[in-house]
Image: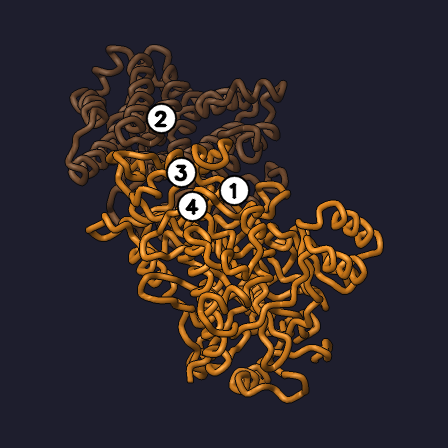
Chain colours: A brown, B orange
């Protein structure tokens, strides 16, 4: 497989994952803004921080006003992390590597781009937002389903999945990074309604509120959330889950190619750090430091994969 | 319905009686509801858009991807008509390859005085670097797209021999695919020759031209200028259908005297490159030094027999519009036979008498740039305003050698589905030919291009033309 093709796949699926995450963050933030308008501005600041685009937003707008936030996150072509920019980039990549995709997957990608281009041609008003977000989620789900239903489980699939899980791990970690203080025992006022809403928002931004409540019979507490998002191997957006997948895919590649590259050891090290610790250990030795270290390692792994599989040279 | 009555119509000939080749189709068509056909037509457009069969138009914004309009009424060619065309096409393609070999070796045709020496030596399409180079199997034009127009029941003319990097074959294949999807019952009623083998044949044909040093299954790659090229869809499509890699210049480099592509596991050598990059951009070390699309040193590897480039560099000298006018002589010189397919009479404006005639009759002629393609920079006299004619007259006087002129042909028409029902529009046909040491193969079908505007003669997709599925009937 061409190095360029591997790069294209990796980034196509990073972009798609990021667009989905952006939509999810917006959904969670919007819910909070609706229920507690006083907290809205703060919430938008953390959404922008989680998405890594706070600076870009501030340069363009004076206030974190819901209308502007929606526009910036969904449609703004000058924001490289807006849903539209992401879909555009994903589709550009898909065009570049058409020959590696099944016809079905290419068509779904193209159709997703056509659908969202139409959907996001005009500003989305607040009352249209829920429907718009659900369209975005549906399009992404179609893509995911088509990937799983039609693609061979080979190197092409591995690079696509690596992109997805690296991006997803980054996204979950960033949400934790922005909200970690809410999950610390010292600051948390268990039972206060503010925190309850904040916690719900965290769960909502990783589509996990239902699953969490099922596990904990509705008892919501910060350490449980941190455990769920970091260590739970059943939860598809947890850091551990992502790294189990990343190590799997790197293992398949290593077997296919008959070479174990440095990125393999790197991923295993990250996974080991997640596996041999309890949430108490992590909180005790510093939740924030842990998350920041994770974000750094995750980035470094991306760079190493690029190098080992000759994405660019 | 035949409102362009003075022209030969593919379905109705010169009268109201439908021609034999359209009998079964016409019968079917008569029993169809027009509204339903329109729905089918809209359906086809949706499918094409979803598949992303788009092209970008040069000079427009990069984001502007356009669909080539597709007409659901097929153009039908009888077995007899087709075999006649094929004999003419293959004779021509054979002559073109003999001509290219000659012109880059002994130049017998110049010594014999059959075409003027300056037509070669002063031609930008002549590539001196190719002198003495013999491509594997002596094949220069692995892929040719011959443009044919019809002016009467038995009158066919070759308009252009596209011997560089002809495009359009993906539309031929996708048009058939969509027709099969939308009108399966038609194909059950009418025996239409299949075109779907083209990618497999292309693959075989290219493989048969692998360098002599290649002992295993040849590794084939399609070289594209990239996603912003107007024909990118086709490059990706063909690579996908052949199971070949789709590469850009920056994926390739010279490694140990071979051309190799950068893969996730290091550099892998390639044997045959089906390039969709023009000669000039192929190799910045040997040709245009500004080119970022090519591979530095690829031409040296090619000359040393380390890789096959299809089509060979320098084939442009055979389809140059000035050389085109000598095709009857060229065919006779190399095959010993008269040309089976006519040329369109052509005035070479470099010749004073011809220029004089062209300037006097400009409003009745079609004038083309010698090196132009895709309908860019051409003048259709009868459709031009006085102002346009005057401007073109000045261009002609300034650089006459840049132009050739041809009579405005009475291109045949074929019915298309319009809002007002069936109407006649002018059509041409691009036939796709594969050349390998094992022989010349013409795909039974091709791309029928249609001028969608009433009475327009310009069929190029870049100028608002559309396409039709093209059926060659099985006997």
User: How much space separates mark 2 and mark 3, taking CA atoms?
Assistant: 16 Å
Camera-near label (2 vs 3) is: 3
Q: Which mark is residue B130?
A: 4
**The numbered mark 3 sits on a residue in which chain?**
A
Q: Is residue B221 left or right of residue B19?
A: left
Q: CA distance from mark 4 to mark 1?
A: 29 Å
Is B11 displayed left or right of A268 in the figure? right
Q: Which mark is residue A170?
A: 2
Whether the residues at callouts 4 and 1 have beta carbons within 8 Å, the answer is no
Q: Report, in whole angstroms, how far the alpha carbon at label 2 lies from the one at label 1.
A: 32 Å
Residue holding disc 3: A12
Q: Which mark is residue B76?
A: none
Q: Quadrant of the C terminus of chain B?
A: bottom left
Element at label 1:
loop
SS of the residue under disc 4:
helix
Task: Locate residue B31, reporting x and y percent.
Answer: 57, 85
Position of the N terminus of chain B by quadrant: bottom right
- Judge whether B80 appears above or below A30 on screen: below
As helix, strand or loop, the secondary structure at mark 3 comes to helix
From this viewpoint, which residue is outermost toward the right? Answer: B386
The front one of B203 and B41 is B203
Q: Earlier in the sequence, mark 4 or mark 1?
A: 4
* Chain containing mark 4: B
**Residue in view at x 55 percent, y 74 percent:** B75
Residue nearest the viewer, comparing A277 with B252:
B252
Q: Are marks 4 and 3 on the same chain?
A: no
Q: Is residue B13 above or below residue B44?
A: below
Percent coordinates x, y for residue B163 in the rendering: 48, 57
Q: Does B81 sit left or right of B202 as displayed?
A: right
């Amino acid at each position: 497989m061409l190095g360029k093709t591997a790069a294209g796949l990796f980034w196509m699926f990073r972009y798609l994952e990021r667009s989905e995450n952006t939509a999810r963050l917006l959904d969670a933030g919007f819910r909070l803004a609706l229920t507690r308008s006083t907290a809205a501005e703060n919430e938008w600041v953390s959404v922008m921080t989680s998405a890594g685009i706070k600076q870009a937003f501030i340069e363009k707008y004076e206030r974190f006003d819901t209308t502007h936030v929606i526009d910036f996150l969904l449609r703004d072509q000058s924001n490289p992390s807006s849903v539209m920019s992401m879909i555009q980039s994903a589709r550009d990549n898909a065009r570049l590597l058409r020959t590696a995709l099944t016809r079905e997957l290419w068509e779904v990608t193209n159709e997703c781009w056509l659908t969202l281009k139409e959907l996001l041609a005009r500003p989305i008003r607040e009352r249209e937002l829920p429907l718009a977000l659900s369209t975005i989620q549906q399009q992404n789900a179609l893509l995911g389903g088509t990937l799983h239903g039609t693609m061979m489980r080979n190197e092409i699939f591995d690079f696509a999945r690596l992109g997805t899980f690296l991006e997803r791990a980054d996204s979950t970690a960033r949400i934790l990074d922005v909200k970690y203080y809410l999950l610390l025992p010292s600051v948390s006022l268990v039972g206060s309604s503010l925190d309850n809403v904040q916690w719900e928002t965290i769960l909502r931004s990783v589509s996990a509120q239902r699953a969490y409540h099922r596990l904990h019979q509705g008892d919501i507490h910060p350490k449980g959330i941190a455990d769920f998002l970091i260590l739970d191997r059943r939860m598809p957006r947890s850091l551990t889950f992502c790294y189990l997948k990343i190590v799997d895919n790197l293992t398949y590649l290593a077997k296919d190619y008959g070479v174990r590259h440095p990125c393999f050891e790197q991923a295993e090290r990250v996974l080991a750090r997640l596996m041999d610790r309890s949430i108490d250990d992590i909180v005790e030795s510093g939740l924030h430091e842990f998350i920041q270290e994770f974000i750094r390692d995750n980035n470094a792994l991306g760079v190493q994969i690029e190098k080992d599989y000759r994405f660019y040279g | 319905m035949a409102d362009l009555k003075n022209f030969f119509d593919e379905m109705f000939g010169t009268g109201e009686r439908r021609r034999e080749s359209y009998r079964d189709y016409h019968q079917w068509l008569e029993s169809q509801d027009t509204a339903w056909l329109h729905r089918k037509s809209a359906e086809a457009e949706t499918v094409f858009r979803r598949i992303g069969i788009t092209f970008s138009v040069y000079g427009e914004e990069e984001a502007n991807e356009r669909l080539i309009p597709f007409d659901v009424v097929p153009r039908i060619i009888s077995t007899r008509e087709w075999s006649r065309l094929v004999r003419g096409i293959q004779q021509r393609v054979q002559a073109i390859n003999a001509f290219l070999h000659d012109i880059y070796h002994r130049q017998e045709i110049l010594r014999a005085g059959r075409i003027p020496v300056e037509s070669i030596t002063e031609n930008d399409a002549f590539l001196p670097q190719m002198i003495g180079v013999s491509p594997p199997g002596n094949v220069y034009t692995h892929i040719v797209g011959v443009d044919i127009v019809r002016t009467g029941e038995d009158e066919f003319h070759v308009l252009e021999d596209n011997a560089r990097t002809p495009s359009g074959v993906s539309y031929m294949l996708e048009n058939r695919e969509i027709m099969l999807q939308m009108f399966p019952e038609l194909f059950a009623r009418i025996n239409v020759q299949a075109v779907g083998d083209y990618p497999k044949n292309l693959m075989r044909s290219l493989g048969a031209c692998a360098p002599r040093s290649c002992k295993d299954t040849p590794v084939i790659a399609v070289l594209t200028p990239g996603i912003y090229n107007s024909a990118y869809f086709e490059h990706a499509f063909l690579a996908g259908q052949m199971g070949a890699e789709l590469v850009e210049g920056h994926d390739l480099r010279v490694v140990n005297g071979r051309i190799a592509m950068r893969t996730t596991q290091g550099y892998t050598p390639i044997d045959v490159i089906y390039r969709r990059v023009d000669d000039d951009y192929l190799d910045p070390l040997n040709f245009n030094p500004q080119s970022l699309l090519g591979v530095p040193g690829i031409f040296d590897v090619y000359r040393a027999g380390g890789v096959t480039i299809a089509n060979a560099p320098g084939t442009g000298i055979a389809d140059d519009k000035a050389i085109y006018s000598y095709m009857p002589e060229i065919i006779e010189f190399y095959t010993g036979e008269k040309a089976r397919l006519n040329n369109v009479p052509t005035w070479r404006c470099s010749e004073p008498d011809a220029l004089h005639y062209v300037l006097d009759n400009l409003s009745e002629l079609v004038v083309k740039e010698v090196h132009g393609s895709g309908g860019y920079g051409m003048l259709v006299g009868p459709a031009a305003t006085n102002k346009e004619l005057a401007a073109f007259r000045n261009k002609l006087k300034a650089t006459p050698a840049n132009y050739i002129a041809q009579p405005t042909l009475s291109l045949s028409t074929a019915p298309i589905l319009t809002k007002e029902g069936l109407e006649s529009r002018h059509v041409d046909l691009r036939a796709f030919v594969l050349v390998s040491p094992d022989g010349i193969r013409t795909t039974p079908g091709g791309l029928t291009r249609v001028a969608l505007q009433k009475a327009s003669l310009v069929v190029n997709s870049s100028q608002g033309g559309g396409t039709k599925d093209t059926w060659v009937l099985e006997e």
